[in-house]
Amino acid sequence: MRIGELAVRTGVSRRSLRYYEDQGLLVSARSPSGQRHYDEEHVRRVRLIRSFLAAGMSSGTIAEMVPCMAEPSRGRAERALVLMGDERERLCSALDGLAAARRELDRLIEVNRRYLAADEQS
Amino acid sequence: MRIGELAVRTGVSRRSLRYYEDQGLLVSARSPSGQRHYDEEHVRRVRLIRSFLAAGMSSGTIAEMVPCMAEPSRGRAERALVLMGDERERLCSALDGLAAARRELDRLIEVNRRYLAADEQS
DNA sequence: GTAACCCTTGACATCCATGTGAGGGGCAAG
DNA sequence: CTTGCCCCTCACATGGATGTCAAGGGTTAC
């Protein structure tokens, strides 16, 4: 599969896919003429990248975590493990923050509802 | 309280506080010489803004939601209510996405642990 | 071989919250 | 009055993921 198909299958623009490769998140096989070729594994990888990006990780961070799946080494794995711990911490805080924001939002919604209901009365 | 104190009390830079005002998120009383003055209510407001910004809302979105607390009107409140519903939806998706990312991360951590444990053996 | 469509790299553009610096005024204590 | 520290506005810079455009080559089918 070439980049266009991967883009369609993952819903990620070609531009972004090339960017991910540039950042070391995604490795493609190249045809003699330089065109990128991908397989099913790449589809899963792209989904993982998106998930992590959407969770607020930088491409640099992902680049240090994910590729150690490809060519693992002791040092790499140890560093990655530390990083992953940090990121997990971050994720948990973000989750808390989001939940708190939702509560605030619910409160605002309630206040607004009451306001409209009172307005209805008058 | 002037802007410096508000900055310290909320942990938000003066620059950002001025930016919030610029975007219509925060309204300050001005002294004759133009200096901004704030009270306890502003502290709470800034915390709310931060919470929403951290949750990924744009300042424009917040600007349409929050100020209708100050000078409410029927139309404003109705529009805000719709917007808040949308944002709540977004928040829920984001929450799901974050939780999913954490699961993926936990899986990676586990894989990495196993790898290191196996390496230990050899 | 030529049309139609995909791909390549490179570079400049965009958005948004912030940082940063310049140039200037406000206000309190010595 | 001066020193020190806070404040003001304006404006340009930054970073990170993407969009977009240009100039050119690859691939496939007729």
Image (spheres, coloured by chain):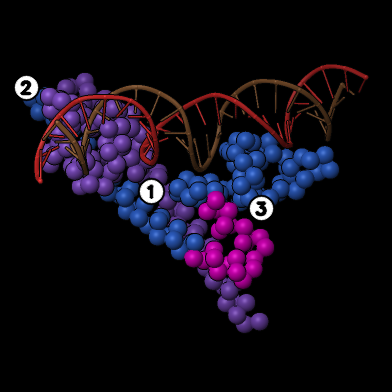
Chain colours: A blue, B purple, C red, D brown
Residue D10 as seen in the image, left or right of residue A75: left
Q: Which mark is residue A6?
A: none
Q: According to the image, label 2 marks what residue?
A: A122
Q: What secondary structure is marked by label 1?
A: helix
Give the x, y percent position of residue B90.
37, 39
Give the x, y percent position of residue A4.
68, 36
Q: According to the image, label 3 marks what residue?
A: A41
Q: How far separated are the C-alphas under marks 1 and 2?
A: 39 Å
The chain letter under disc 3 is: A
Give the x, y percent position of residue B2.
17, 37
Name the kind of residue labelled 3 in the image.
Glu
Within 10 Å of the Cα at label 1, are there few (<14), some (14-19), or many (20+) other Cα atoms? many
Furthest residue toward bottom: B121
* The C terminus of chain B: image quadrant: bottom right
User: Quadrant location of residue B71?
Assistant: top left
Q: Is residue D25 above or below residue B12?
A: above
The chain letter under disc 2 is: A
Name the kind of residue labelled 1 in the image.
Leu
Residue drawn at the location 26% of the way across and 47% of the way down:
B11
Q: According to the image, label 1 marks what residue?
A: B95
